[in-house]
Image (cartoon, rainbow, N blue to C red):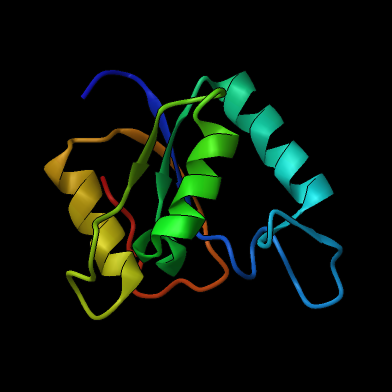
Amino acid sequence: MENKVYVFLDIDGVLNAPGDKIIFEMFEEKKLELLIDFIKEMKASLVITSSRRTYPSDLKIINDIFAPVCEVGVLSEKRLFKYRGEEIDFFIKQNKIKKYVIFDDNDGGISRIE
């Protein structure tokens, strides 16, 4: 894989929390703005790891927001492993990704990839 940076994104608990004013039914506005700025600055590609990736209506909103900013993909269409972290590890190894950031509120089996 080229030298591209990948952002692995969980949504609930990362881009929203109880008490936040929510836009697009899933994002706190300021957190969304910060993430978009980060993605632009890093010229990163986005990989949706959130369980929201399995809901077509949520995925459409996510694509509508992020597609103008970056390449958007999903971790997988269905769960491949018990823990999301294991799925991320698998994706990184399968795609030989060298540079990445994981935004998740749960380590869920994430290990260090070298």
Residue in front for this viewpoint, 63 or 29: 63
Instruction: Find residue 99 and report its image quarter.
Output: top left
Tell me what residue is drawn at x 57 percent, y 61 percent: 11
- Residue 83 placement (x, y as % from top left): 30, 76
Tell me what residue is drawn at x 58 percent, y 29 percent: 39
Does 87 sit left or right of 104 as displayed?
Answer: left
Q: Which residue lies furthest to the front in this view?
A: 57
Tag count in the figure? 0
- Residue 80 placement (x, y as % from top left): 17, 69
Residue in front for this viewpoint, 66 or 47: 66
> In the picture, which quadrant includes the N terminus?
top left
> In the picture, which quadrant includes the C terminus?
top left
Tell me what residue is drawn at x 47 percent, y 47 percent: 60
Does 95 sit left or right of 44 as displayed?
Answer: left
Residue 99 lies, with reference to residue 87, above or below; the image says: above
- Residue 61 placement (x, y as % from top left): 55, 48
Residue in front for this viewpoint, 110 or 40: 40
Does 11 sit left or right of 114 as displayed?
Answer: right
- Residue 21 placement (x, y as % from top left): 86, 63
Does 57 sit left or right of 81 as displayed?
Answer: right
Instruction: Find residue 94 and report its image quarter.
Output: top left
